[in-house]
Amino acid sequence: MNGVNGYDNFDGPTSAYVKRNRKTSFAYKFKKMLYERKKAEVEKSISFDDNHAIEEVCQYVQEQWGFKEADRNSAEYKFMYKQIKHDINSEINLFLYVREDNDAHMDIEIETTTGYITGGVTGKKSSIKEFNRILRDVFIYYGVMQDDIIEKTKRYKNLVSILMQEA
């Protein structure tokens, strides 16, 4: 294997690529400059004035967007619990919210001890766009605290990442 090392991981093989010393192209540098500029604008626009507790976010998902809490005995909940428990690797308090539309299945997972929020959707392209809009709104509603901005915590980085995506 030229420049590639393989590792066996619990979920399958993983590859690590060795970077070669090549000059970066002008197009790459230009795209990176645009990315950094957009990121700086997004970071400048974030304030800590309008943030909410994770419990309020759980309520918001249900009231604002019509999601229903999934049964904790369902196969979907157990699967998500196992996945998130593995990712976080500590005790968790998971809430799974689902919404079924004519052509889509949407779910939002909220872990209240760490503030971990994620989600998924299956369906048409229009449903995926709607879900991305919903998830963006949920992250904006959750917001950040002043400490998150100063320390650039995961909560802050997630909000920046979501805001950088096209609405």
Image (tube, helix red, strand yellow):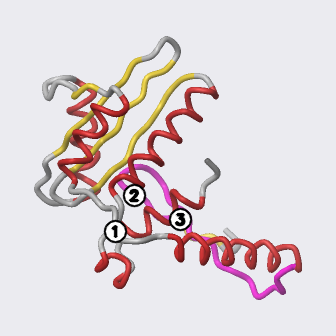
Measured along the vertical axis of the image, is residue 23 above or below residue 102?
Answer: below
Q: Which residue is mark 1?
A: 49
Q: CA distance from mark 3 to mark 2?
A: 9 Å
When asked about the image quadrant of residue 8, the answer is: bottom left
Q: Secondary structure at mark 2?
A: strand
Q: How many neighbours does mark 1 have within 10 angstroms: few (below 14), some (14-19), or many (20 or more)?
A: few
Measured along the vertical axis of the image, is residue 9 above or below residue 83?
Answer: below
**Image quarter hosting the N terminus:** bottom right
Q: How many neighbours does mark 3 have within 10 angstroms: few (below 14), some (14-19), or many (20 or more)?
A: few
Q: Residue at x 49, y 20 (%)?
A: 104
Mark found first going from the N terminus, 1 or 2 = 2
- Write the start and end of the magenta stretch as one range: 7-25
Q: Residue at x 57, y 69 (%)?
A: 42
Q: How many neighbours does mark 2 have within 10 angstroms: few (below 14), some (14-19), or many (20 or more)?
A: few
When asked about the image quadrant of residue 135, the answer is: top left
Residue farthest to the front?
49
Q: Which residue is mark 2?
A: 9
Q: Residue 137 appears at what percent x and percent y?
A: 44, 46
Q: Say which of marks 1 and 2 sits in front.
A: 1
Q: 154 left or right of 130?
A: left
Front residue of 15 and 37: 37
Measured along the vertical axis of the image, is residue 93 above or below residue 131?
Answer: below
Q: Residue 19 appears at what percent x and percent y?
A: 68, 80
Q: 74 left or right of 104?
A: left
Q: Which residue is mark 3?
A: 6
Which disc number belongs to residue 140? none
Q: Residue at x 52, y 41 (%)?
A: 133
